[in-house]
Amino acid sequence: PFMTYGSWSAYGIGLLHGVGAETPTQVVVFAAAAHASDRPSSLALLGCFVVGLLISNSLVAAAATFGFRTVLCNRVVSLGLAAVTAVFSLTVGTLLLSGHSAALPTILG
C-alpha cells in the first residue's frame, strides 16, 4: 500500500500539516514571549521560526523515511511498527483529551 503514494502526495500532506492551526498559534506565542513589538523584530522572529521548522521537520522526515524504508523489506515488522505507532498515538491522545495528561512524562523536565 505504501507504493501508491508519490512525491506529490507526500508534498500535499506536508503542506496540510504546515498550514495547520497549531503553527500560527505557536508563532504568536513565541512573538509574545520574545516581546516582539515592532515589525523588524517580529519578522526576524518569524524567519527564525520558519528556518527552525524547516530544519526540524526535514530531519524528522529523513529519519522516518530511513526507518520505514529499512523495515519495508519485512512485512511483519512493518505491520508491527504500524500497530505500535497507532496504539501509542491513540493512548497519548486519549490521555490528553480525557484530562489525564499528568500520567504522561514531562517533555522539558
Image (cartoon, rainbow, N blue to C red):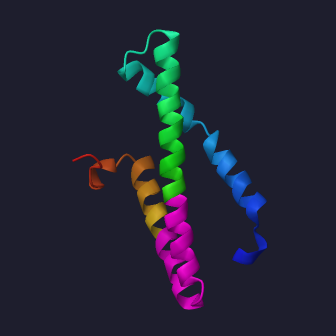
Q: Is residue 80 above or below residue 46?
A: below
* For residue 16, above or below residue 7: above
Looking at the rendered image, the quarter that the N terminus falls into is bottom right
Image point (51%, 39%), residue name: 51
Q: How many marks?
A: 0
Residue 23 visible here: yes
What x and y, as percent, mark residue 37?
44, 10
Identified at 37% across, 46% down, the residue is 99
Q: Return the x and y of residue 82 as percentages of the image width and height.
A: 54, 75
For this orientation, the residue located farthest to the top is 38
Dominant SS type (magenta): helix
The verdict on residue 50 being magenta is: no
The x and y percentages for residue 72 are 59, 83
Front residue of 22/11: it is 11
- The answer to if 64 sits in the magenta stretch is yes
For this view, does 53 lie left or right of residue 4? left
Q: Quadrant of residue 10?
A: bottom right
Considering depth in this image, is 90 or 32 the residue closer to the camera? 32
Left or right: residue 72 compared with residue 44: right
2 vs 38, left or right, is right
Q: Provide residue 23's location: percent of width, then percent of height.
A: 54, 36
Q: Identify the residue at horizontal 52%, vertical 67% (top origin).
A: 64
Q: In the image, is residue 39 above or below residue 76?
A: above
Pick the front one: 85 or 49: 49
What range is drawn magenta here? 60-86
